[in-house]
Image (spheres, rainbow, N blue to C red):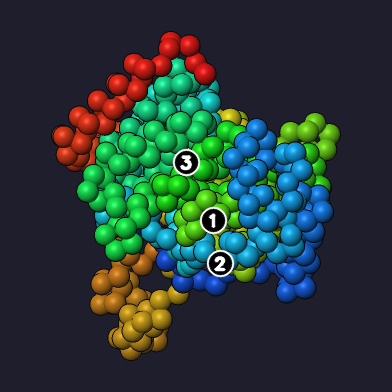
Amino acid sequence: MTEADTAAPRGRRSGAGGRDAKRASRLAAAAHSTPFITRQTPVYEMLNEEGLSLIEYNADTVLQEVGLDFKDDPECLEIWKAAGADVDGERVRFPRGMCRGLVQKSAPREYIQHARNPARSVKIGGDSMVFAPAYGSPFVRDLDGGRRYGTIADFENFVKLAYASPYLHHSGGTVCEPVDLPVNKRHYDMVYAHMRYSDKPFMGSVTHPTRAEDTVEMCKILFGDDWIDPITGRPKTVTTSLINANSPLTWDATMLGALKAYARANQATICTPFILAGAMAPVTTLGVCTVTLAEALAGMALVQLINPGAPVVFGSFASSMSMQSGAPTFGTPEPAMVLYVMAALARRLGVPFRSGGGLCASKVADAQAAYESANTMGPTCMAGVNFVLHTAGWLEGGLAMGYEKFVMDCEQAGQWEAFLKGVDVSENGQAMDAIYEVGPGKHFLGSGHTQRNFETAFFRAGLADNNSFEQWSAEGADDMPQRANKAWKKMLADYEAPAIDPGVDEALRDYMDRKKASFPDSNY
């Protein structure tokens, strides 16, 4: 009798209830989540000293001779002028080494982003990695409803799914765009959802300076007496928010206003050039790296001029493009090389680094989505990215957030976390007692060492099906998206909100109601 012959009867005996129980057991075994990853594996270096120094030199040349535009923000121009930069209209040129010197003088190499549940606080920088959901999609997709505009209900669902996943350390920010709410008011509900339905760290609003200020005020309410660090006397860093350059070589008033609001409140900002190679930067890897470094340096240096010591994260988002259609492409070799190089440049600069994620251009959670996402997450983890935005859910070049894709990506994040823990060289890892016990010609299945380690020896995938064809067929022949559809629905059905002080919750709601009432009905 073969293994295939014996597998099918077992599957038929276990039935759906047995299958669900086994899957629940696997997921429960994985639920011992850590607040963040401390990597034990080495990083991969793409370029040598000569190549990295060349990019640094070229970026400083761009800053000195070409300069950057700071659009519609006279205050920022005055800040740069007072610091010694050459300001000509909205164009700012920087003495060679000025931006690098400002960053290296006061920007922290790593920082703690405090969560309302202290056990969920994360370290960003150094040897740590933090996984956060995808960000910014106007559409959502699932097997039942297809592609549609996101709503606040979808937003809350993804916050809950991120909270429930043991492999996401961060609640993220705009996990999808709730287009059913007015633009000038929706940020209140979005920030509140992160505060109420999760106790993991989160990102703030950046779509208008006043929305960043609202985020800060809501954080003050949420943290109360814990808002101020008693040792430093400065506000604790409780948000890490995304500030995108308007590439090429431009920072606009919207992003600058949010940057200033967060910097003055000692909240972390991720200064990220958003580059489509060939459009917002040259087509070559070194050209992309040069523009990215120049733009990010200027943003991070501005933060340090506004509030020396405020946390900054060096961000890089670069995709290739189809030279035939102009559409962005993902999972290709060139952006991976950019990612490796920028991670090394961030380490040399001495600041945390953000990049990567489960990026793909596929419209659905299919093979293209899987391999393109894997081709981005692999370099992300091997390069040593500290803050990984877009870890889970990304579809359609970021236009859609997929429910099935979300839970599939979370499982991949869990496998990467297991890999990044490195090789166990402890006495248990050496397993010499097992080798002595079993000896030649026998098997290790019944050894004491195997019995002690069988639950944790290998990553236990909750979605992947490793059964025989017969058992898989008997249990419904579901493919991966179908299994993922069931998984996210069960996660939401089982979701329990973390506790929150009723007085804090009431104060947050009161703040939101008062602020919303102060706006006219039209958006701005």
Q: Is 470 left or right of 349, judged from the image as shown? A: left
Q: Is 104 left or right of 121, judged from the image as shown? A: right
Q: Is the Cβ of the residue at disc 2 closer than 8 Å to that at disc 1?
A: yes
Sequence-first tag of 2 and 1: 2
Q: Secondary structure at mark 3?
A: helix
Q: Which residue is mark 3?
A: 261
Quarter of the image where one finds residue 193: top left
Decide: is 136 above or below 23: above
Q: CA distance from mark 2 to mark 1?
A: 9 Å
Q: Position of residue 275 (x, y in %)?
A: 70, 43
Residue that protrudes farthest toward the top in the picture:
521
- Amino acid on which the number 1 mark rests in the picture: Gln
- Amino acid on which the number 3 mark rests in the picture: Ala
Q: Nearer the viewer, residue 135 or 501?
A: 501
Residue at x 41% of width, y 47% of height: 265
Decide: is 506 above or below 172: above
Q: CA distance from mark 1 to mark 3?
A: 13 Å
Residue that protrudes farthest toward the front in the picture:
82
Q: Position of residue 167 (x, y in %)?
A: 39, 51
Q: Nearer the viewer, residue 29 or 42?
A: 42
Could you say which disc has been placed on residue 304 in the image? 1
Could you say which disc has been placed on residue 105 in the image? 2
- Amino acid on which the number 2 mark rests in the picture: Lys
Q: Secondary structure at mark 2?
A: helix
